[in-house]
Amino acid sequence: MTKITAIIPTLNEEIHIEAAIKSVHFADEIIVIDSYSSDKTVVLAEKHNVKIIKRKFDDFSSQKNFAIDQAKHLWIYILDADERVTPEVEKEILKAVKEPKDKVGFYARRCFYFAGKKIKYSGWQRDKVVRLFLKEHCRYHGVVHETIKAKGELGFFKNKIDHFGYKNYNHFISKIHQYGELKAKELHEKGKTVNAFHLLIKPPFRVFSHFILKKGFLDGYFGLVLSITQGYAVLTRYIKLWLLNRSEK
């Protein structure tokens, strides 16, 4: 039987870590790679049969690729601490590793929850991520919103995993600033500059895109809040980039 290593990257995930670990109980090895959490994440994880690795965070891809290199098994299932593998997807995972049918990895679609409410539109209706893959064929690339680059064909699971992305609005905003700083640094290192288009056009268009084009209005008040916040995320990213460029001068 082909064995699986599950990997869970963490930073201050005490409200999620135990449920995340339990949702990958089918894995033959579970690695928690922790970026020196200041809460009870590690203490709670230690209650379970997992391997804990502490590593200073530099970027999302590097963190995950490092953990992949520590895995004992060829098949990797990687999940964020705020994700849960449903029983339906668990069955698909176990079948996929037995009968991959020439696939080197599989996308999992995600059912997104915000502050406890299921979000059906607002840009998340097509949300998908590669979660199960053969480690010799797949690596992460990108500083923020990292993606898998696969040497081979990828398949899809039919069912969705649950994604409890943000417990409240303050949590959402803190993540936006974290991602914004990382993305601004990446753009700065590529020599990108900021102009009026980035500050005056892109943010409102992002709001329009999520609320109208991606049907955020069908999520009601939550859709409006999420769409406006997406515009704020774009504005934040370019303000941080402008400050980085300015400080260098």
Image (cartoon, rainbow, N blue to C red):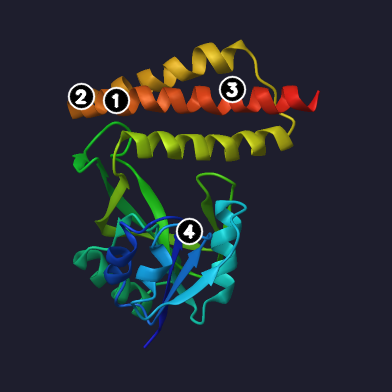
Q: Residue at x 25, y 34 (%)?
A: 121
SS at circle 2: helix
SS at circle 3: helix
Q: Which mark is residue 161?
A: none
Which residue has dot 2 on it?
221
CA–CA distance in space, label 1 to label 3: 21 Å
Q: Is residue 231 left or right of residue 245?
A: left
**Of the pair 133 and 146, the residue shown nearer to us:** 146
CA–CA distance in space, label 1 to label 2: 6 Å
Which residue has dot 3 on it?
239
CA–CA distance in space, label 4 to label 3: 28 Å
Residue 20 location in percent, x, y?
31, 64
Q: Which amino acid type corresponds to the residue marked 2 in the rendered image?
A: Tyr
Which residue has dot 4 on it?
37
Q: Residue at x 65, y 39 (%)?
A: 186
Question: On the image, which quarter does residue 31 sit in?
Answer: bottom left
CA–CA distance in space, label 2 to label 3: 27 Å
Marks 1 and 4: CB-CB under 8 Å? no
SS at circle 4: loop
